[in-house]
Amino acid sequence: MSDFLSDMQFVTPAGRDPGRFGRAVLVVLWLGVCVLPMVFAIEDLELATGRAGTPGTLRVVSCESLGEGRYDCDGIFTPDSGGAPVAVDASPDSEAGDVTRAQLTPEGDRAAPAGTRGVLAALTLPALGVGGLGFLPYVIMYWAGARRGRRAAVAWGFLVTAAGFTGMLVGMVAAYS
C-alpha cells in the first residue's frame, strides 16, 4: 500500500489543505449529496400523502426476480372512484398477493404505497440526507479556525446523525413490512 502513496498526494496525510476553493467545492458536494435525496423524494411524499395521484387499492399480481436481491413487481390498481382496474408497476419491495392502499401516479404507470406506511417509506432517503448533514457545521467551523463551539457542533452532529439514521431505519422497516 505504501508503494502507491507517493503517486496519490491528495490522499496522503502530508498536511496539505484543500485550500479555499477546494473547501468550497467539498462543502457544495457534501450539500448536494445530502440535499438531493430530499428533492428526489418530493414526488413520493406527494403520492403517499394523497396530494397527487389517484387513491385506490393495489393488488400485487407477480414479482419476478432480477437477480442479486432485486425484483420487478406488477400489480392491478383499482381506483376508489370505481374506474376500470389498471395494470401498473408495483413497488419492488412487494410480494405477490399483497393488497394495500396505494396512490396511482398521474402518469398512470406506477402505484406507490399510501398512508402512514407510504409516508414513512418515502421519508427514508430524506432522513439519510439529514443524517449526512450532521457533521457539516463542525467541518466548516474546523476549516474556519473557530475554536469556540466546536464541541457543541460535534454533539449536535451526533444527535442529527442519530436522528437521520433512526428515520432511515424506520422508513426501511415501514417499506419492507
Image (cartoon, helix red, strand yellow):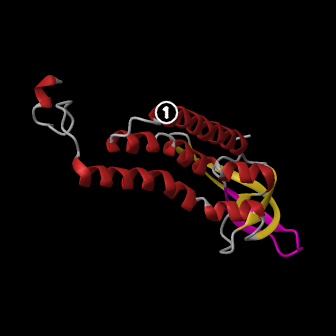
Q: Residue at 33% across / 50% down in the picture?
A: 26
Quarter assignment of residue 166: top right
Front-most of residues 151 and 56: 151
The quadrant in which the C terminus is found is top right
Estimate the x, y position of residue 79 in percent, counting from the top left.
Answer: 83, 69
Using a 10 Å C-alpha cutoff, classify the residue at mark 1 as few (fewer than 14 neighbours), some (14 to 19) or many (20 or more): some
Q: Amino acid at mark 1?
A: Val
User: As displayed, is residue 102 above or below residue 26?
Assistant: below
Provide residue 34's location: percent of width, then percent of height: 48, 51
- Residue under label 1: 154
Residue at the front extreme of this rendering: 148
Q: Is residue 33 found inside the magenta-colored segment of the image? A: no
Q: Which is the main secondary structure of the residues drawn in magenta?
A: strand
Q: Residue at x 78, y 48 (%)?
A: 97
Compared to 54, does 145 lie above or below?
Answer: above
User: In the picture provided, is 50 more to the left or to the right than 14?
Assistant: right
Up/down of 37 relative to 86, above or below: above
Q: Residue at x 14, y 37 (%)?
A: 9
Quarter of the image holding residue 169? Answer: top right
Left or right of residue 160: residue 113: right
Identify the magenta region: 74-90
User: Which image quarter holds the N terminus?
Assistant: top left
